[in-house]
Amino acid sequence: MKQAIHPQYFDTQVICVCGNRFTVGSTKEVIHVELCNKCHPFYTGEQRFIDSASRIEKFEKRKKVAEIHKATVVEKIEKQKSRDNAPKTLREMLLDIK
């Protein structure tokens, strides 16, 4: 093996947000994680949302915007239908024929 090309290997302390700590081997001295086997819903059986990037709030905001947009589209369609059902002038009827 060549000398001095391999990274330094540590007994690394992994620290979770919940306070759990355990040791693994790695090239980093300390690793901070958001989830571990003690707090992850899959392992604990809890039903909860893990929202580290506020994805749920972003989704709900987009959903509200989509509902507003849908309402305006429906309103435009209703206006167009009312215009189409309104009595036409002779000129408009002749243009529609062509």
Image (tube, rainbow, N blue to C red):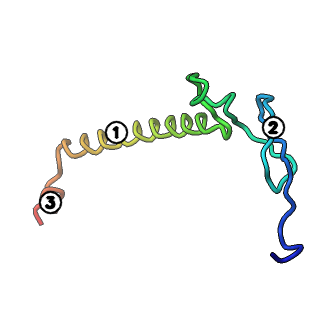
Earlier-in-chain disc, 1 versus 3: 1
How far from the left and from the top, in percent, is residue 88? Answer: 17, 49
Around disc 2, counting alpha carbons within 10 Å, would you say few (fewer than 14), some (14 to 19), or many (20 or more)? some
Q: Nearer the viewer, residue 39 or 95?
A: 39
Residue 44 quadrant: top right
Amino acid type shown at disc 2? Ile
Residue drawn at x 58%, y 34% as measured from the top left: 56
47 to 3, vertically: above or below: above
Report x, y in % for residue 33.
75, 41
How far apart marks 1 and 3 lie (CA) works out to: 25 Å
Query: What residue is shown at x 64% (from left), y 35% (from top)?
Result: 51
Residue at image mark 1: 74
Identify the mark at residue 15; answer none if there is no mark. 2
- Marks 3/2: CA distance? 73 Å
Which circle's residue, 3 or 2, is located before the other in the chain? 2
| Residue annotated with mark 3 | 96
Q: Quadrant of residue 35?
A: top right
Q: Nearer the viewer, mark 1 or mark 3?
A: 1
Q: Give whichever of 8, 52 is nearer the camera.
A: 8
- Does the residue at mark 1 contact the one at mark 2 (Cβ under 8 Å)? no
* Front position among marks 1 and 2: 2
Q: Amino acid at mark 3?
A: Asp
Query: Label 2's element?
Result: strand
Q: Is residue 24 above or below residue 43?
A: below
